[in-house]
Amino acid sequence: MLKKLAKLSPLLFFALVSLSFVDLSFFDHPFFNSLHFPTQSTGDFSACRQFFAKGHVPAMRATTDMRPRALCFSAFAVMHSGKSHTPIYVAERLNRQIIYKARENERSDQFYADARLPRAERAELDDYKGSGYDRGHMAPAADMADSTAMAQSFSLANMVPQAPVNNRKTWAAIEKATRQYVLRASGDVYVITGPVYDSRPATIGNNKIWVPRYLFKLIYDPATGRAWAYWVENTDQAHASKPISYKELVNKTGIQFLSLPESDNS
């Protein structure tokens, strides 16, 4: 067999023989093994509707110019924008069991560009270097109940450029308060997080990643019918204020996140 290949192409013969001596065990590292996606990269979240209350995917107005693309992960779902190179929103389904497991899970800190996105639509690691902004999780690493979910949460498709003090203090406190509520809840709680931009957003990196003006986190508890949202400016001086109503969030973002009875849409 090798003699036949050598006759066809000496270069091909050399490449095949050389490959037989390459150590591919690097790709058996747990980090790579954990990056299994249940998933599609476009469409309607058919592979991960469990992260949305009643399977209802948020309805967005005038989205085509944002180049939306649905991404499913093992513990959350991302509607990604190929124009901003960031999420439009990220959806999670949390409960007490998930939070207890997440407490025991080790943070990975292995950020990576998401290869499922076309190169022209995604953020790269170099875009954040020297920018002065953190790579701010929308679905928090501290919500992830196992190593697969943890590794996937460091996809740049789950990140926005976030003011560092905001990310590590103000926003971290909001994430913690959300987990504390989930621990008190009687069942599943649905959380949707995302950025909001100015009409002319600042950008970072060669790929011009949009910098949000505001961040929001919507919490919906089906058991009580309550829905509310945190709304925070993306600055180091921002402080968490009183949560806003679901209706106010819809008015601010133009996104109908939930399918609620009119009586609960407040």
Image: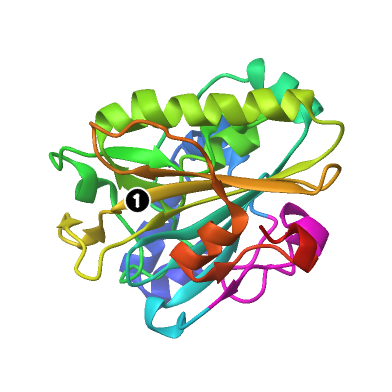
Q: Amino acid at mark 1?
A: Tyr
In the rendered view of the protein, which quadrant contains the N terminus?
bottom right
In the picture, measured across the screen, residue 226 lies left or right of residue 119, that is right
Q: In screen coordinates, is 234 left or right of 156? A: left
Q: Does 59 lie within the magenta span?
A: yes
Q: Secondary structure at mark 1?
A: strand
Looking at the rendering, the stretch of residues picked out in magenta corresponds to 38-60
The correct choice, above or below, for 112 with respect to 102 in the image is below
Is residue 265 or residue 148 the one in the foreground?
A: 265
Give the residue at x 52% y 35%.
Answer: 140
- Tell whether position 143 is magenta: no
For the C terminus, the quadrant is bottom right
Q: Residue at x 33, y 72 (%)?
A: 83
- The secondary structure making up most of the magenta span is loop
Report whether residue 77 is seen: yes
Q: Is residue 39 left or right of residue 18?
A: right
Quarter of the image for residue 96 reads top right
The residue lying toward the viewer, choosing from 56 and 117, is 56
Residue at 51% x, 80% y: name it. Answer: 61
Residue identified by numbered label 1: 214
Residue 11 pos. (x, y %): 31, 66
